[in-house]
Amino acid sequence: MLKSILSLSFISIISVSAFAQTDSTGKPSTVKTLSLKQYDALQKGEDMYHMGWAAELNHYPAPDKVLASKDKLKLDDAQVSKITAINTELIRKKKEMGVFIIRNERAIDSLFRIKRINDGNLIYYTNRYGIYQGELRNAILQACLKTQKLLTAKQINKFERLQDNK
């Protein structure tokens, strides 16, 4: 009986794991520990965990969202230029951190696969993962902070009204 339960549990875990590594078309990711959706988001610099919400929910808008509404917010040329620079740097940083996270995932997978994992390298790579995520979140929140400083109170209020209407 215990063997049957363990076998069933093992099959369930494998099924869930296999599902998590493919997209809706069944196409696998090139990193078996990441779904294709996660892998693509990391490559493209997309924020799949909404790391900017702490800022955005407290009146510190994301630069890309402000730029999308620049005409309605009546941003001047200097504001557009500075916010564009903030957004460009944020995109670069998000892609850079995505590459680091992917490499880290590959290293962890490889260490387990070749049975070279130990306490020391496991601690190292899992801590690296935390550092990369922290650096990514910092970059996103810093971009929101810098963007907010470039806007007037009137522009922030207008931006929030525009967001509420979406």
Image (cartoon, rainbow, N blue to C red):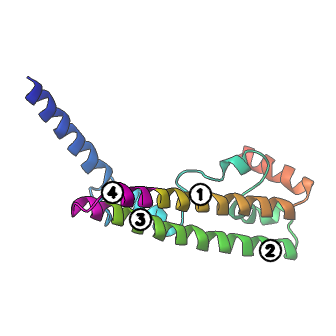
| Secondary structure beneath label 2 | helix
The amino acid beneath tag 2 is Lys
Q: For the residue marked with disc 1, what is the amino acid? A: Gly
Which one is nearer the viewer's eye here, 35 or 118?
A: 118
Which mark, residue 33? 4
State which quadrant residue 31 falls in.
bottom left
Circle 1 is placed at which residue position? Answer: 134
Which callout, 4 or 3, points to the residue nearer the camera? 3
Instruction: Tell me how far mark 4 sits from mark 3, CA to CA.
Output: 11 Å
Q: Position of residue 117 (x, y in %)?
A: 29, 59
Give yes or no for contact between labels 3 and 2 (Cβ–Cβ under 8 Å).
no
State the predominant SS element of the stretch in magenta: helix
Mark 3 vs 2, N-terminal side:
2
Where residue 122 appears, as percent x and y from the top left, is 37, 57
Label 3 – label 2 distance at C-alpha = 33 Å
Crowd rating for badge 3 (residues with CA inside 10 Å; few <14, some 14–19, many 20+): some
Q: Amino acid at mark 4?
A: Thr
Observer-side mark, 1 or 2, equals 1
Q: Which residues are magenta?
A: 109-126
Disc number lying in front (2 or 4): 4
Label 2, label 4: how many angstroms apart (C-alpha)? 38 Å
